Image: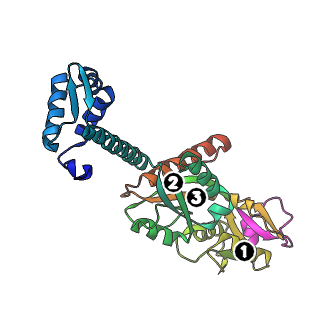
Amino acid sequence: MTYEKTFPLALELRHYRYFHVLAQELHFARAAEKLNISQPALSQQVKWIEAEIGAPLLQRGGRKVGLTKLGLALQERAGSILEQNERAHRHLLAVASGNVGSVDIGFVASAALSGILPRIVYDYRRAYPSTEVRVHEMDMLTQVAAVESGRLDVGFVRPPLPLPESVTLVDVLEEPMCVVLHKDHARAGDAKIFARDLRDDTFICTNRLAGVGLYAITLDICKQAGFEPITEVFSPQVSVLVSMVAAGFGVTLVPQSTRAFLPPDVVFKPLADTVARSRLALVSDRRSTSPTARAFIACTKDWSRAQAKVGGRKTDLR
């Protein structure tokens, strides 16, 4: 009969721990003290183990204690089991703290082009190097649906946009809007641009959905300037909008951070007659129990707070 079959399933983790410590100390009093139990209790536990196995584990002779062949085998088995348990315990703690696992992040293109998303992901990966990060570019409404269904952990969006009851939003950054003009535009040499001077231009937008994203902000800016803009939609990606300006299709209004993406033949100009701002926000599902998602949200908030301190940018960390 092998020792694998000799050791009964009735043995609990504490029994393996008791015997493992005793086998190391080979002294009941010292082992009991190390285990923080009484010596008689330890002796009873060892006798119970021997009764369950049906064979002696110890060679008892006066004050000396030795291990039988079966005792040596149990000592080896106990050490292996305790080590596996410790590894499992450490793994569970790591999972619970968000140190291992994965996080799926959705984003709109402007979050990446501006450099904001890469910086936040960089900070997160430094803090949680064992976590797998997966990023997915998609439009805002698709992101919200994916967050609600659990296909995404978080998403970077540009409000305003409608949100389901379970999806919560945290502002990451609030920044001024600016206008992108072709370098040959009549107003390209102006230090600042008045929105009213663009009433005859075509505004290139990401969508024409009422109350959603940069389209809603564009309509509001033009309304404040006293006109309804001519709009054209080429793509939901800000990079494509700017490229269309370079191709001469019109003008576009974008967040200030998009200046980081500066192709040839276009100029970025601040708006003179509006205080309109664009918000970059993080959406997540309030029902989520994912430790990695919680860790990423916390890291994003930390980054946002740091930016607010350094640059004085307005943020809302509800």
Task: Point out which mark residue 280 bears.
Answer: 3
- Pointer 1 or 3: first along the chain: 1
Question: Residue 196's spot in the image, x, y percent?
Answer: 72, 68
Q: Amino acid at mark 1?
A: Arg
Percent x, y of residue 276 = 63, 59
Frontmost of labels 2 and 3 is: 2
Q: Earlier in the sequence, mark 2 or mark 3?
A: 2
Q: Is residue 72 above or below residue 7?
A: above
Disc 1 element: loop
* Position above or below: 92 against 58: below
Position of 73 with respect to 171 (left or right) is left
Range drawn in magenta: 178-198
Q: Secondary structure at mark 2?
A: strand
Between residue 196 and residue 305, name the one nearer to us. Answer: 305
The span from disc 2 to disc 1 (Cα, nearest Å) is: 49 Å
Residue picked out by circle 1 = 199
Label 2, on which residue?
Answer: 131
